[in-house]
Each structure stands twice: as C-alpha cells, then as structure tokens.
Image (cartoon, grey):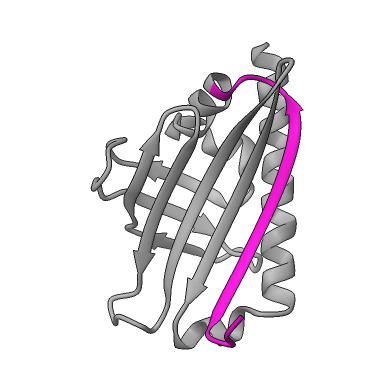
Amino acid sequence: MSLFTCEVSAEAEFPGSPEGVWQLITDHARYPQWHPVVVRVEGELAVGARQTEVVRTASGRELTFHPVLTVVDPGRELSRAGRLPVPGLLDNAHSYLITDLGDGRVRVVQRERFTGLLALFLHGRTARDTEARFAAALGNLAGLAALAG
C-alpha cells in the first residue's frame, strides 16, 4: 500500500437480518445512537445524491463533509465517496458491506479508504483510533439490531 493511501476497516458478526441492518444504517436520525463518529447525516438515499455528514474527530472537533452516494444496494451495500475541494489532496471512499450468513446472522464491514497527499498523515495512531471507533459503531449497531429483533 502506498504512503498516500490509508485504509481502515472493522467488521462484526451478530444476530440480525440484512434488511434490519439496512434499516438502521439508512435511518439518518438514528446514526448518533450507534455511531460515535457521526453527529448528523442528511440527504436523499439514491445513487448520485449528495449527503451532508457532520462527524466528530477523536479530538472532539466537528467537521462537515458532502459526499456523494456511489452504491445504494438495499440489504447489501451502502457506499459514498468524497473529497476536499482540491482534487488529490484527500479523497475518500466509505462503505458498509452487509453479508447474510444464514441462520439469522449477518456480517457487517465498515471500510474507509483515503487517498491523496494528506493520507500520509492518517497512518498510525489516527488509523488505529478510527478503526477502534468503527468497531465501537458496529458493536452499537449489533445491539440495536438485537433490540429490533
């Protein structure tokens, strides 16, 4: 992997259905209940739709992004891509991948790939912190999925 590429991911397997997980990850109002990074998400759920996403960094700073949805495949994948105003400075692709494991269980992978000059500064501690926050989000998501039955 290049120094100008940083990938972070977390995955979890838990009781639930792809449809139930999909309902949770597409319910913008509920994001703050389960995702420790996401403060707010707004926007239409359609490929090509621009979202408004407010996230909280590990230091507590809030940042607003406007990614575009690239994949909306109910029960399987929700992906978006974003970039800073200067192309090549920092671009990202973020995905939730849902797999039906059968017997009432699912696997959810949350993955983010950063590319560009600033990705160089995301390796190490920032990447580890982000992966830990993704893992916490998936743990919270599993809890909500269990409550939803």
In the picture, which quadrant includes the C terminus? top right
- Dominant secondary structure, magenta: strand
Left or right side of 145 for 18: left
Is 113 part of what is drawn in magenta? Answer: no
Q: Residue furthest front?
A: 102
Please, is residue 120 above or below residue 76 in the view?
below
* Residue in view at x 57 percent, y 27 percent: 21
Q: Position of residue 139 (x, y in %)?
A: 75, 38
Q: Position of residue 114 (x, y in %)?
A: 50, 71
Q: Which span of residues is magenta-colored?
A: 1-18
Q: Residue at x 53, y 37 (%)?
A: 31
Marks counted in the figure total 0
Q: Is residue 31 above or below residue 112?
A: above
Q: Is residue 108 above or below residue 143?
A: below
Quadrant of the drawing holding the N terminus: bottom right
Q: Which x, y percent locates residue 89?
A: 39, 84
Q: Nearer the viewer, residue 76 or 39?
A: 76
Left or right of 78? Residue 126 is: right
Left or right of 29 in this view: 66: left
As for residue 15 lying within the magenta part, the answer is yes
> Compared with residue 116, is residue 111 higher up or lower down, i.e. above or below?
above
Res 144 → quadrant: top right
Quarter holding residue 35 = top right
- Name the residue rendered at 28%, 76% in the picture: 85
- Residue 76 position, x and y percent, is 50, 33
